[in-house]
Image: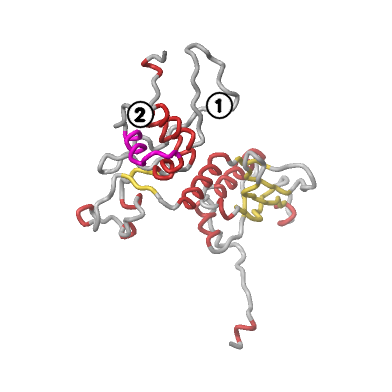
Amino acid sequence: MTGPEETVDLAATLRALRRQADLSQRELAEKAGVPQSTVARIEAGRATDVRFRTVEQLVRAAAGRLTIALAGSAGTEPPDTRSLPLVPHEGLRDAAGRQCPPHLDAREVREPRDWPGAWWAAWGNLPPPLWPLPLPAATYRRDRRERDRRRRAEEVRRSVRIRRFTGGDLPATSWRFVAELPDGDLVGELRAHEVSVDLLLGYDLGDRREVVLDGVLVRAEARGLGIGRRLLEALRIELQRVGIVRAHAIAEFEGIGFLIACGYRVETGRPVAFSLDLEAEHR
């Protein structure tokens, strides 16, 4: 028999299964052939007499499997068995005390900018008594495509690795850093090259070298995750390691603010770019 310390939290387990299967309560109920009210009661912890057959139907509908074993029979689990991660926001409740849908990504609302419905969030520090609407305790997005995009982005943020690429046909004075996923998929790249200040100025300065940044590229769906900043940080660390104290870059549009945010300064004494548009003169 199973001891009290080994009892399963059926409500949390069912919610975790539903999250893994990406099913709403209604969808799970339809697949399992049970009333949605039954699923709701189980997940709310209000069902204390759930039939084994009902549990089996729900688990199978969520692509899970029930395993029954004798006490002390360790090591007898099926080879494809894996632990079931709990719902990240399991303890989050709305204002009425209800749990948020486990298959969606819920988050706590602490200020207007946390809630998409707070259209006044951009007005600045508006005092709470003047808020047009009360803030909910929690919020989540119903759009599964947007949810999946955010999940993929978060997975990229967690798993991406930055390294300097060397070897191959890369010249010794060329610097290349790559941002790649565990499977080798490239999501970002930084390229730069060394210049000899001695040759540029015509003086012997003890082989003084500087680096010119050629560009930082990040795949469109991976932008906004800090990958470009991490590439520049990897460049800075490598500069310190080899004893180079200065790096230069040329940027325009949003690249200017990006470099400034990463510690680069505008050099007023550097050359200015000009263009002559003959076509514009005849418009």
Report the label total.
2
Indicate whether 172 appears above or below 123.
above
**Element carrying mark 2:** loop
Which of the marked residues, 2 or 1, is nearer the chain's N terminus? 2
**Residue 33 located within the stretch drawn in magenta:** yes
Q: Which residues are magenta?
A: 32-44
Please tell me the numbered disc located at residue 50: 2
Q: Quick one: quadrant of the C terminus?
A: bottom right
Tell me what residue is drawn at x 63 percent, y 79 percent.
Answer: 277
Type of amino acid at the residue the image marks with label 2 = Val
The front one of 128 and 78 is 78
**Residue 216 located within the stretch drawn in magenta:** no
In the orientation shown, which residue stands out farthest toward the left? Answer: 129
Type of amino acid at the residue the image marks with label 1 = Thr
Q: Main secondary structure of the magenta part?
A: helix
Q: CA distance from mark 2 to mark 1?
A: 24 Å
- Corner quadrant of residue 46: top left
- Identify the residue under disc 1: 81
Q: Quick one: quadrant of the N terminus?
A: top left
